[in-house]
Every structure is written in structure tokens, then in C-alpha cells.
Amino acid sequence: MNNERSLYILGTRGVPAAHGGFETFAQRFALHMRDQGWRVTVYCQVDEGPSEPVIDEWQGVRRVTMAANSGAVGTMKFDWACVRHAMNERGVMLVLGYNTAVFSAFLRLTGNPVLTNMDGIEWKRAKWPWHGRLWLYLNEWVGALTSTKLIADHPEIARHLKRRRSERDIVMIPYGADAVTEAPTEPVVARGLTPGNYVISIGRIEPENNILPMIQAFAEKPRDLAFICLGKLEPGKNAYHDQVLAAGGDRVIFPGAIYDPQIVQALRFHAAAYCHGHSVGGTNPSLVEALGAGNAIIAHDNVYNRWVAGEGQFYFKDARECSVIFDQVAQKGEALAKAKARANARFMDALQWPPILQDYQRLCETSSVSTGKG
């Protein structure tokens, strides 16, 4: 079999997508490559099932499903099982994330090209304990040194990777999204909101995402504007969550995590602006999706968000600056209208799925040709 026609996607929970950005990408790219005539295999994780891999087909994509518990240990077991299986295969290995690069490094022993999307700088995230950060730091190095090519989803991540690897081995391809031009208003009204008269935050509620400063800025005084904050909350178990809830009081709506994509899309589409406090990472999928929905952006001021969202958006460094922005957005004036228009222009220019998938395809084709046939 010609390995340039076979693709193996590792590192996600699999398809169909139901969890996060990497899963969404895996699904989109698998179907794209299927349509280009490639034989595509995606490794999938389930919590319960047979001890042996289950192989089936989904929409023309081959799936190899492994049973492993969720959580760090279960994910490590799953990743190792996937690598062992993939070592007997021939083709381009696309690994999404480097968290277990010490395992995926074994794929190079087979002579297969290994393309690794290096995600964000995971070991810098405050949520990990010291030993977790050390593990991630070591795996970043291993992934950088053993992969055939490194994929950075943001120019800043590419610059970071140049400290580990030659620039010629690094390819910058951002994350993508679909344009959203309409959405029902029922999910909005059902949550007591008025279309166009609220801001929304979607993401993990943790310090590095600056949820607390945004909530504090919004709740400090009344405005003709609502705030809905989507994300899993564990009051009584998580001190930061307790702080966020206390700060929001009765001025912020906390529905918890919502996993129905149609509801989330409707809530995002009809918002006056999308609030994005993320301070660590590369091209964040939720921010790209907000741009695809034509949202004005209220974002933490850092190199990651400024490159993704572009000029003409609202950026803040602290709660005081964020409060001033909420005042501007509540006026629903020209600045807000311009931000929406620029968000749409930025999305159309650089963050749509079709050209991004084509960039990945070209990388796979170049990598597979350079290694010959298996």
C-alpha cells in the first residue's frame, strides 16, 4: 500500500466529534481526506468496552476504538495502546497534541512520517501541579525532537518551537471554524436573554482564562446589558468557582456547561459581544468560532488573542479596563458595529476551514512523498 494515501489521526477522543477543538478538527480533516481518496483511520476512546481494539467504519472513515477510563491515567493508557497499534500500520501519522509524545516517538521507529500539532504551551498552565508541568515540559521536548514536522497553530507558538527545532521543520497552520449566518432565537429567549443585548463567555472557568476579572468588571454596576457565562462549575469544591459565583451575584447568568452545539451556537450568534479571557495558548477554537459568528470580541490583551481576533476589537489588561469596555458595548454604538464587521473580515481572510484543511493536506502529501512507499 502507498503510504502517501493512508492517514492515521491520533491524540483525540475520536469521531464523531463530541468533546473539543481537536475532535472537531479530526472529524473535519478525516472527512476532507476521505474525499481526496485517502484511506483515513482515526483512533477513538470510549470509557467502557472490550479489552481488544474494535475496528469499524464511520462515514467512510476507519475507526479503531479502544476502551480506557477518562482522566490523565486513562488517557495515557489509551495513547499508548493507539501507538502500539499504529506501529503495525503504514502511512502518515498525525498526532494532535504532545502530552504523551514519549509514546508517539516510537512511531518514528517504523519509518512512518509523524506530524505533531504542538497545541499550546501546556506546561505553563497554572492548573497543573508541578509534576504535571514537568511531564508536559519533557513531552514538549520529546515531541519537538522526534516528530518529522511540527505544526504550530499560531505564530507565537511557532516562535516558541524555534527554540526546540529548526524553523524549516515547523509549519504554521491555524485552527478554523465555519461561518454562522443565522441561528434560532429560542435558546436565547429561553434563558431570559434578549438577542443582541448580552455578552457571553464560553470556556473553562479557571484563573488563566481571566473569568473572575471579567465577572467583577461586569457586576460592579448596572448596565443595559446581560452577561451569560458558560462553563462547568463546582461550587464548594473549587475555591475559584466560589469566587466567580460570589462576584457575579444576580447580575451574571451561570447555566453551567452546555454541550448541545446548536444551543451554544445560537447563544454565541445573538450576543452583542464574545468575552475571551484566555491568556495562555495559541489559536483558541472558541475564539475562532466567535469570529465565524461575526461576534465583536472582548479579549484579554495578549499576543495570542490579538493575532487571532485582529485589529478593531476590544482588549483589556485588567478588570478596570474591562469595565470601560462593557460601558462601550452597552451603548451599542458605532464601535460595536465596526468590531463586528472587522471580526467577520478577519475570519473570512484567514480562519475558514477549507484553506486550512488544504494546508494540512499539502503537508501530508509532502511528508508522505518524501518518505517513499511502504
Image (cartoon, helix red, strand yellow):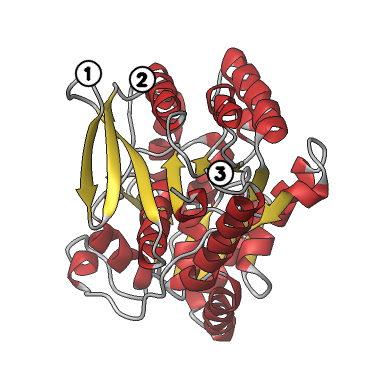
| Helix, strand or loop under label 2 | helix
Foreground of the two, 254 or 47:
47
Nearer-N-terminus badge (3/1): 1
Relative side of 102 to 172, left or right: left
Foreground of the two, 1 or 288:
1
Rendered position, 211 above or below 273 = above
| Residue drawn at (45%, 65%) of the image | 177
Query: Residue 180: x and y, percent?
Result: 37, 75
Rendered position, 288 above or below 49 = below
Query: Residue 332: x and y, percent?
Result: 48, 80
Q: In the rendered image, is residue 198 in sight? A: yes
Q: Which-is-in-front pick, marks 1 and 2?
A: 1
Query: Residue 262: x and y, percent?
Result: 24, 63
Q: Which residue is mark 2?
A: 74
Residue 321 sits in quarter: bottom right
The CA distance from mark 1 to mark 2 is 13 Å
Q: Which residue is mark 1?
A: 51
Q: Which-is-in-front pick, marks 3 and 2?
A: 2
Q: How many marks?
A: 3
Spot the residue most to the bottom: 334
| Helix, strand or loop under label 3 | loop
Q: Which residue is mark 3?
A: 210
Nearer-N-terminus badge (3/2): 2
Residue kind at label 1, given as amino acid type: Ser
Residue kind at label 3, given as amino acid type: Asn
Residue kind at label 2, given as amino acid type: Gly
